[in-house]
Image (tube, coloured by chain):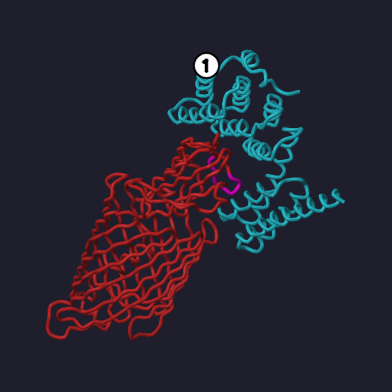
Chain colours: A red, B cyan
C-alpha cells in the first residue's frame, strides 16, 4: 500500500484500523462528501473540479470491511473515478495482529498522461505494541494508458504510536515501476537506459483528534535510486470539523506525489467539501462501551478500578463527577485501558467515551440518562 | 466591647469564606471556554443560589455538560431540571435534609423514583442521613427494578439496620444476576432475602440496640 493510497483510504473511509481494533461505536457507517477542488498537475494549468465521494464501512470486533468510491470532474472534461474495497481482519479481539488487504480500481482521463485505468491490490500486516505498533506490507498495480500497459509495485514498513488525541506515524517505502508517462509528468527521469524507475519514500504523518475537530498532516520525501533521478518533497494537510452529529466540513490541501502503484499523478490539490455521515446504532447501546468498574473497599472509602476494553489506537476518555468532569489519566494494559482512583464515601457519576462515540456508562454500573444524549454510571462508595 | 469584637471577627470570617467560595466558583467558570455558555451557567448559578440551591451540584451539572460538548441550551435545560428536582426533593425529604440527601434525591427523581418513595425513606430514618439509601434505590430503579418493589426492599433492609456495605452489595448483586439473565424483580427478591437472612428482624433490632430507635 503506497503512502498515497494509504492517505486516500484514510481520507475517504476514515482510519480503517481504528474501528476493528477499537470496538467502533457504529457497526455501519455511510459517508457522502460533496465539494469542490482546485487541481494542478505539474506544468499544467489549475483546474477547478467537482468532487463526490461515497464510503461505507462495517465494523465488528474482529472484522472491518470498507468500500469507497469517488469521482472528480473538471470543467475541461478531464475526469477520474476511483474506488477502494478493503478488508481488515483480526484473529480475536485480544490479538495484537491485524491484517489488512484490499483492491483498488480507477478510470481516468488526465491532462498530460492520457486516458486509461488502473487496478491494484495491497496486503499489510500490523502488530500492536503498547499504544502503537509496527507494520509491513506491499502492493502491486497495473495501469493502462492509451493502450500502453505499465506496472508498479512497492513495499512499505512503518510504525505508529498514539498519545491521547495525537497519533503519529513514520513510513519507509520502496517502489519500482515502468510507468514512464506517470513519472515523466512528475519530473522524474532515468539517467541512463533502464527498464524501470526506482524510488525510495519516507513519510511522517500526524493525526490529531479532539472533540469535533480532526487534523491530519503528512510530509513525504522521495529520492531516486539506481538509475532514477528524483529529489522531491510534498506536504499534505486535512481538517475536518463536525458541525453536528451528521454534518462536517472538510478542507484539505497540499501536494501528492505520483503514486506508481495506483497510477495517480503528481498533483497539487486544494479542496473543500461537506460531509454527511449516517451511522447505525450499536447492536447494544447498553454494553457500556466495553468498560467495567470494580470497587475495592478501603479505609475511609474505596478504590475504583475502571477498565475499558479498547485498542491502543482508540481514543478513550473517562470522566466523572469525582474529577470535576475533567478526563482522567488512563494507562495502557494488555487488553485495554485502565485507571484507578481513591474515592471517599459518597455518590459519583462516571462516563466513558471511545473515539467519537457517545458517552456511555460502564457496563456493570447502574445506567442513568445524562440529559445530554448520553449516559452516566452511578457509583456508590459506602 | 468583647461582643462587638466577636461580631467583627465573625463578619470578617464570613466575608473571607464567601470570597473564597466565590473565587472557586469563578475559577471553575473559566474552564468554560465558550462565552455564551459561561454566561448562561453564571446566570443559572446566580438564580439557583438566590433560591436556596447550593452552587456545587449546579456547577457539577454545568461542567458535565461542557465536558460532553452539550449546547448552552441543553446545559441550561439540564440545570433548570436539576433545580426543579432539588426543590421537589427538599419537599419530599423535609424537614431538615442535608445537601447530600437533596443531591441524591434530585438524582432519584430524575431516574423516575416517585416522591412518595423518598418520603417513605425519610419517615423510616428521620434523624440521620439517608443519602446512601436513596442512591441504592436509584441504582435499583436504574437496573429496571420496579420502583415500588425497590423502595419496599430498601425500607425493609433499613428497618433491619442493614449497613451501607450490605446495601451497595445488594445493588451490585442484582446487576450481576440481571446480566446473567435473571429478571430484575426476581434478582432483587433473591438477593434481598439473602441479606435479610444475615440480619435480625426489625423488632430484635430495637431490643438489641435501643439507640437505633428513630428519634421523634
**SS for callout 1:** loop
Question: Residue at (46%, 27%) from the top-left corner?
Answer: B177
Q: Compared to A205, does B53 lie above or below?
A: above
Residue corresponding to mark 1 = B197
How many numbered badges does the structure rendering display?
A: 1
| Side of A151 where A94 appears, left or right | right
Which chain is disc 1 placed on? B
Question: Residue at (62%, 23%) from the top-left corner?
Answer: B158
Where, quadrant-wise, is the N terminus of chain A in this rendering? bottom left
Does the stretch in magenta take in B158? no
Residue numbers of the magenta segment: A370-377
Q: Quadrant of residue B152?
A: top right
Question: Residue at (21%, 76%) from the top-left corner?
Answer: A199
| Side of B63 where A18 appears, left or right | left
Q: Residues within 10 Å of mark 1 (few under 14, many from 20)?
A: few
- Considering the whole magenta stretch, tell me its main secondary structure: loop
Question: Residue at (72%, 43%) from the top-left corner?
Answer: B84
Please state which of residues A112 and A31 is positioned toward the viewer in this rendering: A31
Residue A58 in view in this figure: no
Q: Quadrant of residue A218?
A: bottom left
| Side of B123 where A46 appears, left or right | left
Residue A39 in view in this figure: yes
Amino acid at each position: 500500500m503506497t503512502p498515497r493510497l494509504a492517505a486516500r483510504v484514510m481520507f475517504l473511509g476514515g482510519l480503517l484500523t481504528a474501528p476493528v481494533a477499537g470496538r467502533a461505536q457504529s457497526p455501519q457507517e455511510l459517508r457522502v462528501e460533496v465539494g469542490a477542488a482546485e487541481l494542478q498537475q505539474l506544468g499544467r494549468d489549475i483546474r477547478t473540479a467537482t468532487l463526490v465521494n461515497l464510503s461505507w464501512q462495517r465494523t465488528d470486533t474482529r472484522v472491518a470491511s470498507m468500500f469507497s468510491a469517488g469521482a472528480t470532474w473538471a470543467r475541461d472534461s478531464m475526469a477520474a473515478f476511483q474506488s477502494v474495497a478493503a478488508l481488515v481482519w483480526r484473529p480475536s479481539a485480544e490479538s495484537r495482529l491485524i491484517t489488512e488487504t484490499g483492491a483498488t480500481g480507477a478510470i481516468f482521463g488526465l491532462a498530460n498522461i492520457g486516458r486509461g485505468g488502473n487496478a491494484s491490490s495491497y496486503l499489510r500486516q500490523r502488530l500492536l505494541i503498547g499504544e502503537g505498533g509496527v507494520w509491513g506490507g506491499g502492493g502491486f498495480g497495473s495501469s493502462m494508458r492509451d493502450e500502453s500497459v505499465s506496472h508498479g509495485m512497492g513495499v512499505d514498513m512503518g510504525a505508529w504510536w498514539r498519545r491521547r488525541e495525537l497519533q503519529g506515524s513514520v513510513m519507509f517505502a520502496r517502489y519500482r515501476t515502468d510507468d514512464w508517462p506517470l513519472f515523466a509528468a512528475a519530473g522524474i527521469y532515468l539517467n541512463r537506459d533502464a527498464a524501470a524507475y526506482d524510488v525510495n519514500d519516507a513519510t511522517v504523518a500526524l493525526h490529531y483528534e479532539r472533540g469535533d475537530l480532526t487534523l491530519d498532516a503528512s510530509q513525504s520525501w522521495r529520492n531516486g535510486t539506481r538509475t532514477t533521478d528524483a529529489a522531491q518533497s510534498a506536504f499534505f494537510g486535512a481538517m475536518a470539523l463536525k458541525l453536528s452529529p451528521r454534518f462536517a466540513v472538510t478542507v484539505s490541501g497540499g501536494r501528492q506525489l505520483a503514486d506508481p502503484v495506483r497510477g495517480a499523478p503528481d498533483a497539487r490539490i486544494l479542496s473543500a467539501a461537506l460531509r454527511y455521515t449516517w451511522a447505525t446504532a450499536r447492536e447494544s447501546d447498553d454494553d457500556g462501551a466495553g468498560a467495567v468498574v470494580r470497587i475495592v473497599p478501603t479505609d475511609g472509602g474505596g478504590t475504583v478500578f475502571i477498565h475499558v476494553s479498547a485498542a491502543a489506537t482508540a481514543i478513550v476518555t473517562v470522566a466523572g463527577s469525582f474529577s470535576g468532569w475533567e478526563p482522567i489519566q488512563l494507562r495502557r494494559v494488555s487488553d485495554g485501558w485502565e485507571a484507578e482512583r481513591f474515592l471517599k464515601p459518597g455518590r459519583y457519576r462516571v462516563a466513558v467515551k471511545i473515539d467519537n462515540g457517545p458517552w456511555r456508562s460502564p457496563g456493570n454500573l447502574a445506567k442513568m440518562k445524562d440529559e445530554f444524549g448520553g449516559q452516566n454510571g452511578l457509583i456508590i462508595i459506602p | 466591647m468583647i461582643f462587638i469584637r466577636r461580631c467583627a471577627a465573625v463578619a470578617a470570617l464570613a466575608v473571607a469564606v464567601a470570597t473564597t467560595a466565590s473565587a472557586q466558583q469563578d475559577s471553575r467558570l473559566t474552564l468554560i471556554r465558550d462565552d455564551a455558555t459561561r454566561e448562561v451557567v453564571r446566570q443559572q448559578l446566580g438564580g439557583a443560589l438566590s433560591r436556596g440551591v447550593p452552587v456545587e451540584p449546579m456547577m457539577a451539572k454545568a461542567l458535565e455538560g461542557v465536558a460532553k460538548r452539550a449546547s448552552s441550551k441543553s446545559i441550561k435545560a439540564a440545570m433548570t431540571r436539576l433545580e426543579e428536582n432539588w426543590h421537589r426533593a427538599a419537599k419530599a425529604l423535609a424537614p431538615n435534609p442535608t445537601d447530600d440527601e437533596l443531591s441524591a434525591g434530585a438524582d432519584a427523581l430524575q431516574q423516575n423514583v416517585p416522591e412518595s418513595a423518598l418520603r417513605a425513606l425519610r419517615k423510616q430514618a428521620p434523624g440521620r442521613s439517608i443519602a446512601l439509601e436513596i442512591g441504592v434505590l436509584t441504582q435499583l430503579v436504574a437496573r429496571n427494578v420496579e420502583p415500588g418493589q425497590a423502595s419496599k426492599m430498601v425500607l425493609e433492609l433499613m428497618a433491619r439496620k442493614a449497613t451501607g456495605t450490605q446495601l451497595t452489595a445488594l445493588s451490585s448483586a442484582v446487576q450481576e444476576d440481571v446480566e446473567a439473565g435473571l429478571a430484575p424483580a426476581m434478582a432483587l427478591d433473591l438477593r434481598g432475602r439473602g441479606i435479610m437472612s444475615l440480619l435480625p428482624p426489625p423488632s430484635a433490632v430495637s431490643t438489641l440496640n435501643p439507640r437505633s430507635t428513630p428519634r421523634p
